């Protein structure tokens, strides 16, 4: 009989006024490899699973109906949300040692919407935007930004009224929204924290006439700070506006603006801004209007403000539970994204960001096609994808050679790839007598195209949700 090893990890949260003091919990190294981190909604267990029945419990939720979401992976660490949607613990777990760092309670949307939780490029700081339980009921989203030490979770700095931020190795860029007596955001500040103190870049920024702010994102490129505003205007619908400010302070000017195809909502990532390789252009995400999570990608040249459309009908992140399907390669030079038509047909594309190339179609496009999972290998050489419709399978594309390879066939839920691209974990439908459909948690060896069942599905049970896999 396979040996079942149970590892209990105690989580301690200590709240002192507005700061969270989170202590690294020393945990015994899971005694098996490879190891899969997954949520079991049937038993309310969050645990590591391995071959031959190996098992190491991380924590147990109060209810099997808890919201379980992987937030962000950085290095050998994964941040996850587990518990109630409006307020529940978010935690860092090390995939190699099993050690955890509690980050304190937060809204689930801070986990699922891109940019609310960030790690600086070299990993020196971890940013967590803490949202109130009623954050999604407000016309705009603000919270308290805590900048933490990712090793032990200790608080390094906090700023309130933050709607968006960007972490860098030398500090944090922050955009704040402030409400008037009607509860609408009609003023904004830009701030910079250098690791020791804050300074204002621009103060009391106002929306266009007869407009209010509904969303904002901010980045730094060269000696400039670029702020993307989403605004709702009386009798004119919604629009987007790109503003440039000098990093040293002031000298703000609008360099581009346009009509948004739909409204801005706090539960979706249809408002975002990214610096393209070479820092000569920005990529903006703006609402399309087809439905909540559909956006258009707009490219803005910084030299002349010329606006061009890079892609339309792009699927972005949406709260509460949806796999991330808008993913940059590890080197930041290629974007993988999915489009969806009005009929629901989905298509996976890649877009080279360091040139003028058009998006390249990878798979999909038929009416029944759905892209259920996308992941990059750690070196960015391959993109893995799970599809249903024309082909029920998991495959990968080698970008350098253009080689495509179908790995396994079936219908899958959830999808995670190891950093080296050699292992995939997913839940696969298993039909028994063509009536009883169960979902097995499986591990796929990419080189050997071999499946290993880690957890057999229960009759009338729910599929386990895979978060990550590591050796």
Image (cartoon, grey):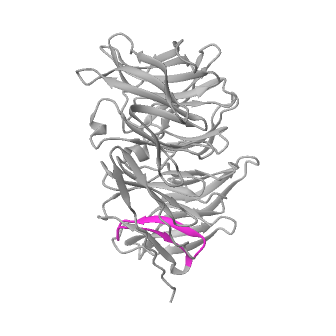
> Residue at 52% across / 74% down in the picture?
453
The foreground one among 333 and 383 is: 333
Task: Please identify the residue farthest to the top as the structure is shown.
Answer: 209
Residue 325: x and y in percent read 51, 45
Quarter of the figure with residue 194? top right
> Residue at 46% across / 37% down in the picture?
341
Q: Is residue 379 above or below residue 115?
A: below
Q: Is residue 368 above or below residue 11?
A: above
Q: Is residue 205 left or right of residue 32?
A: left
Q: State yes or no: residue 39 in magenta.
A: yes
Residue 20: x and y in percent read 39, 49
Q: Is residue 358 left or right of residue 188?
A: right
Q: Is residue 210 above or below residue 161?
A: above
The foreground one among 86 and 438 is: 86
Task: Please identify the residue farthest to the left as the structure is shown.
Answer: 182
Residue 363: x and y in percent read 59, 47
Residue 90: x and y in percent read 41, 53
> Residue at 47% across / 52% down in the picture?
153
- Whether residue 204 is visible, yes or no, is yes
Q: State yes or no: residue 248 in magenta.
A: no
Segment tinted magenta in the rendering: 32-51
The foreground one among 204 and 306 is: 204
Task: Please identify the residue farthest to the bottom as the structure is shown.
Answer: 1
- Whether residue 463 is visible, yes or no, is no
The quarter of the image holding the C terminus is bottom right
Quarter of the figure with residue 130? top left
- In this rendering, the count of numbered labels is 0
> Residue at 43% across / 46% down in the picture?
112
């Amino acid at each position: 009989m396979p040996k079942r090893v149970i590892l209990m990890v105690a989580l301690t949260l200590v709240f002192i006024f507005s700061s969270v003091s989170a202590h690294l919990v020393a945990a015994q190294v899971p005694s098996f490899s490879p190891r899969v981190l997954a949520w079991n909604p049937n038993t309310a267990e969050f645990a590591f699973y391995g071959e031959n029945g190996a098992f190491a419990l991380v924590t147990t939720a109060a209810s099997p109906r808890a919201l379980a979401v992987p937030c962000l992976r950085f290095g050998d660490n994964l941040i996850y949300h587990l518990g109630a949607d409006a307020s529940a613990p978010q935690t860092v777990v090390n995939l190699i040692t099993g050690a955890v760092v509690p980050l304190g309670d937060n809204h689930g949307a801070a986990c699922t919407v891109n940019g609310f939780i960030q790690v600086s490029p070299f990993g020196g700081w971890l940013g967590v935007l803490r949202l109130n339980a009623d954050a999604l009921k407000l016309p705009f989203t603000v919270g308290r930004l805590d900048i933490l030490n990712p090793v032990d979770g200790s608080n390094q700095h906090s700023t309130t009224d933050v709607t968006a931020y960007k972490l860098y190795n030398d500090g944090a860029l922050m955009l704040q929204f402030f409400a008037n007596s009607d509860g609408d955001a009609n003023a904004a500040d830009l701030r910079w924290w250098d690791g020791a103190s804050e300074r204002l870049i621009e103060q009391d920024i106002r929306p266009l006439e007869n407009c209010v702010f509904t969303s904002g994102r901010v980045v730094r490129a060269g000696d400039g700070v670029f702020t993307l505003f989403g605004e709702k205007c009386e009798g004119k619908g919604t629009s987007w506006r790109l503003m440039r400010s000098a990093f040293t302070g002031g000298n703000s000017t609008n360099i581009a603006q346009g009509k948004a195809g739909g409204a801005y909502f706090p539960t979706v990532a249809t408002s975002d801004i990214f610096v393209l390789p070479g820092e000569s252009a920005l990529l903006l995400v703006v609402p399309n209007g087809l439905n909540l999570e559909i956006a258009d990608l707009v490219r803005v040249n910084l030299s002349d403000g010329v606006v061009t459309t890079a892609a339309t009908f792009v699927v972005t992140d949406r709260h509460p539970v949806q796999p991330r399907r808008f993913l940059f390669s590890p080197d930041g030079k290629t974007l993988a994204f999915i489009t969806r038509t009005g009929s629901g047909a989905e298509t996976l594309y890649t877009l080279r960001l360091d040139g003028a190339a058009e998006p390249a179609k990878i798979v999909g496009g038929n009416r029944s096609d759905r892209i259920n999972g996308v992941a990059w290998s750690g070196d960015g050489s391959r993109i893995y994808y799970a599809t249903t419709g024309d082909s029920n399978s998991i495959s990968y594309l080698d970008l350098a050679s253009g080689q495509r390879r179908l790995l396994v066939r079936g219908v899958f839920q959830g999808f995670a790839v190891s950093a080296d691209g050699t292992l995939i974990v997913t839940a696969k439908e298993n039909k028994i007598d063509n009536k009883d459909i169960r979902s097995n948690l499986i591990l796929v060896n990419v080189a050997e195209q071999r499946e290993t069942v880690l957890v057999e599905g229960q009759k009338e049970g729910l599929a386990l949700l895979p978060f990550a896999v590591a050796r």
